[in-house]
Image (tube, grey):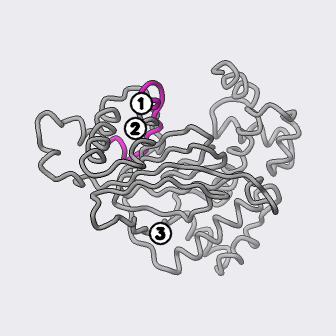
Amino acid sequence: MKPLFHKVPVKLQSSFSIRHDIWSKFDTIWHYHPELELHLTVRGEGVRFIGDNISNFSSGELILLGENLPHTWRCKDEYFAPNSELEVEAIVIHFLPDCLGKDILHLPEAYLIPNLFEKAKQGMIINGAAKDKLNELMFSAIYATNLDKVIILLSILKILAEAEDYETIATGQHSINRSTETDTIRLNKVYNYTLTNYKKEISLEEISEISNLSVTSFCRYFKLMTKKTYYDFLIEIRISHACRALVENKLPTEVICFDCGFNNVSNFYRHFKKVTGVTPLDYKRQYLQKK
């Protein structure tokens, strides 16, 4: 879906932004910005959308997003329940590629940094020893001032640029055009309605009405904006929730199937393997082996 341009607020006396957020839930709109984003989820669980990828997120996940890569995070249904006492916590650093000066990017000693920025255009999940070092630096960055703040950012960039244990998120680079206000309102209505109602049958007539388009116009519009059909989008959301339920290992696979909106087990197995490349049982086994 077409994302909304977002202006990242940066204090006049700062060259980049550091935030430490504690909220009742993540529920941001689908958006993008020219700043790179280093996002540490300290606490929280749910689904994240980055480029063309729909996946689960959980506590401790560290992600670097490149410039203008569309993204959003949304918490599990439990966070939206009345009287929920759940909270999410994140540390987020936003910085422009040349926030420390354009010359630094052209230094022969700093050749890894432009390479890092290029890799980040597809999004990177940082793992291993680099992740542990970066977590510590990000907490330090919250309270740093003056040159200490700049030194920490340089240290963060060094670790990211040298990191070898990472996973790429999106399948390709994304050229972004600014959304109109109408696009933003329409697509976020579709996005929010789908995430709230994915467990039940959602007809094209129903979702088209939400977007104030005819069925034919909606199907064409959604495919143009997302490069996938609405039903492909809906199935990916259902499978992402199924993946989380499988690794939580509290319910039988057949129960998970119907709880995530599939109307029969064989249909669920077929879609699960198409999206993940493995069966539900193999997916669970692979996760449990990593623990």
The residue at the point 24 percent across, 55 percent down is 99
Q: Quadrant of residue 190?
A: bottom right
**Label 3 secondary element:** strand
Q: Give the labeled residue for mark 1.
A: 133
Distance from label 1 to label 2 (Cα)? 6 Å
The residue at the point 71 percent across, 24 percent down is 282
Query: Is residue 59 rendered to the left or right of residue 136?
Result: right
Residue 255 spot, x, y in % from top left: 88, 40
The N terminus is located in which quarter? Answer: bottom right
Q: Compared to 138, does 79 lie above or below?
A: below
Q: Give the labeled residue for mark 3.
A: 4
Tell me the amino acid under the disc marked 1.
Answer: Lys
The residue at the point 73 percent across, 68 percent down is 204
Return the mark for residue 32.
Answer: none
**Label 2 secondary element:** helix
Q: Main secondary structure of the magenta part?
A: helix
Query: Is residue 287 rendered to the left or right of residue 48?
Result: right
Q: Quadrant of residue 21?
A: bottom right
202 is within the stretch colored magenta: no
Tell me the amino acid under the disc marked 2.
Answer: Leu
Q: Earlier in the sequence, mark 2 or mark 3?
A: 3
Distance from label 3 to label 1 (Cα)? 33 Å
Q: Which residues are magenta?
A: 117-133
Return the mark for residue 137.
Answer: 2
The C terminus is located in which quarter? Answer: top right
Tell me, yes or no, whether the two marked residues, 1 and 2, touch with CB atoms within 8 Å.
Answer: yes
Distance from label 2 to label 3 (Cα)? 30 Å
Residue 211 spot, x, y in % from top left: 65, 76
Which mark is in front, 2 or 3?
A: 2
Q: Earlier in the sequence, mark 3 or mark 1?
A: 3
